[in-house]
Image (cartoon, grey):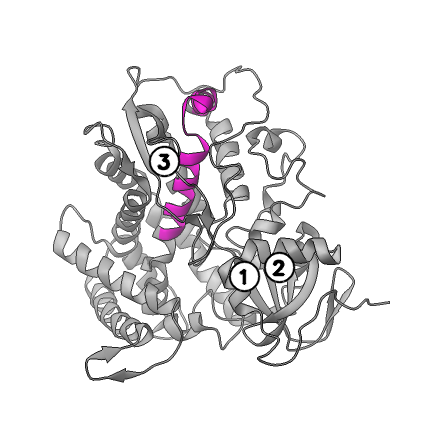
């Protein structure tokens, strides 16, 4: 027998909890989990009855077992800002797009990307310790992400055409700000809403993209134009998605969290082991994604009456999985709030598919593998060349979670060069490292302004 979802959706408008959620989504969820004794509950969000999924089992049921029942919302602002693409479509169309595009992220058109990725890391990170002054790492990582994305996907390289690179980066930022602003397309003399500005930026980006598709024969653009896509606009809409600020911001979020997790003399042993053992670095990166996912989660609409975790979910209602709380489900992750990379070679070995920081199931992020290549290249470079610590050491590391997770106050980090920069890569016999208390383990909650 189906059970009624814990919680209440109240009445239209008056019962809406959107403001409370956006102010602090983590506290919003944790209070209700404790109140209802359930990691699946309901509330009203965006003036719509919404079930919140905060358990691994519920997330897998939502995104894997019932992915054909819970669909992307066709009225979502992402659809309006990006058009129909692999992220916003549903059903057979989404499956066919995924089949067509998958080779772009695993095939020969990105096979030569490793040299470019290395060159971007070198150029972006080689001077981190040169001034002996603390560095604000988030903006550095965001620009690095932009260089990777625009160079690989659009063949626009910052060192070759700096003015074009800066123009596109600026337009991508304007476009991004529109996504996170209210979708009100209003424009009057001397004033325009962020959304209107974003639409103008989108149109300019599309002009640049279409010109690239017409002229470029090689690389990712050339591979994309050769695909059997549904219509003439499909390639340009996907390039708009791939070069958007989403990827640089996700990379900046994860790289900042990695830097903070391995910060200071207390984490020197962890840095050394990750420096020596590529497999351990993989575990560190998994743990960073588990504790500090770049995006809060994702939203689906039930296409029919169904269930989640034994609870009744009515047709037309919304369901949202919250990555942070899914990743800290104590039923799956022992000591869920602790930074313990070793869990991925112990109790949670082989369970990487229980994370949802970049989605899960048949609709997960098509660029997950490439994202890992980016992360491992940047983190590997940092580990081989630097030690680092917070400066000053008493900074606030409270996180904000929307629109992308990062410390609310951008952290300042001082880097010191390693004397031995040619550490051998081994699968070494380093002794096991147990629970680590990283600098921001206790400062995990924050505002979302």
User: Alpha-carbon neighbours of circle 1 within 10 Å: few (<14), some, or many (≥20)?
Assistant: some
Q: Do callouts 1 and 3 mark residues in contact (Cβ within 8 Å)? A: no
Q: Main secondary structure of the magenta part?
A: helix
Residue 82 left/right relative to 315: left
Q: Position of residue 391 (x, y in %)?
A: 33, 31
Can you identify the residue that label 2 sits on? Answer: 63
Q: Is residue 10 above or below residue 414?
A: below
Camera-side residue: 349 or 393? 393
Can you identify the residue that label 1 sits on? Answer: 298
Q: Position of residue 369 (x, y in %)?
A: 45, 45
Camera-side residue: 248 or 161? 248
Q: Do callouts 1 and 2 mark residues in contact (Cβ within 8 Å)? A: yes
Q: Can residue 216 be seen in this view?
A: no
The Cα atoms of the two marked residues, 1 and 3, are separated by 27 Å
Can you identify the residue that label 3 sits on? Answer: 377
Instruction: Give the magenta part as a residue range.
Output: 249-274
Task: Determine the secondary structure under disc 1.
Answer: strand
| Image quadrant containing the N terminus | bottom right
- The earlier-in-sequence mark between 1 and 2 is 2
């Amino acid at each position: 027998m189906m059970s009624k979802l814990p919680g209440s959706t109240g009445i239209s408008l008056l019962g809406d909890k959107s403001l409370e959620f956006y102010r602090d989504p983590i506290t919003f969820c944790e209070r209700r989990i404790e109140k209802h004794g359930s990691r699946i509950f309901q509330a009203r969000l965006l003036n719509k009855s919404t079930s919140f999924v905060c358990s691994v089992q519920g997330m897998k049921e939502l995104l894997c077992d019932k992915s054909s029942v819970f669909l992307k919302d066709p009225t979502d602002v992402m659809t309006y800002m990006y058009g129909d693409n692999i992220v916003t479509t549903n059903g057979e169309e989404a499956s066919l797009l995924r089949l067509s595009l998958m080779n772009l992220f695993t095939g020969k058109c990105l096979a030569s990307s490793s040299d470019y990725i290395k060159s971007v890391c070198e150029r972006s990170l080689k001077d981190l310790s040169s001034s002996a002054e603390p560095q604000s790492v988030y903006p550095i990582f965001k620009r690095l992400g932009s260089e990777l994305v625009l160079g690989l996907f659009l063949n626009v390289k910052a060192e070759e055409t700096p003015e074009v690179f800066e123009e596109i980066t600026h337009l991508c930022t304007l476009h991004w700000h529109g996504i996170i602003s209210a979708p009100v397309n209003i424009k009057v003399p001397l004033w325009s809403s962020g959304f209107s500005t974003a639409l103008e930026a989108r149109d300019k980006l599309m002009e640049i993209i279409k010109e690239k598709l017409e002229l470029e024969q090689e690389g990712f653009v050339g591979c994309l134009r050769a695909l059997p896509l549904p219509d003439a606009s499909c390639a340009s809409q996907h390039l708009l998605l791939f070069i958007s600020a989403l990827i640089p911001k996700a990379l900046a979020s994860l790289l900042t969290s990695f830097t903070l997790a391995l910060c200071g003399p207390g984490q020197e042993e962890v840095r050394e082991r990750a420096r020596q053992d590529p497999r351990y670095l993989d575990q560190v990166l998994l743990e960073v994604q588990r504790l500090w996912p770049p995006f809060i989660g994702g939203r689906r609409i039930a296409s029919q009456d169904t269930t989640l975790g034994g609870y009744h979910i009515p047709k037309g209602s919304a369901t949202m999985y919250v990555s942070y709380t899914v990743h800290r489900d104590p039923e799956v992750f022992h000591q869920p709030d602790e930074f313990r990379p070793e869990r991925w070679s112990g109790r949670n070995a082989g369970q990487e598919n229980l994370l949802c920081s970049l989605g899960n199931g048949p609709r997960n992020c098509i660029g997950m593998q490439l994202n890992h290549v980016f992360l491992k290249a940047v983190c590997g470079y940092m580990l081989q060349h630097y030690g680092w610590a917070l400066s000053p050491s008493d900074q606030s590391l409270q996180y904000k979670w929307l629109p992308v997770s990062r410390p609310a106050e951008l952290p300042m980090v001082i880097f010191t060069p390693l004397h031995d920069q040619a550490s051998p890569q081994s699968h070494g016999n380093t002794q096991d490292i147990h629970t680590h208390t990283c600098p921001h383990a206790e400062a995990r909650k924050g505002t979302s302004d």
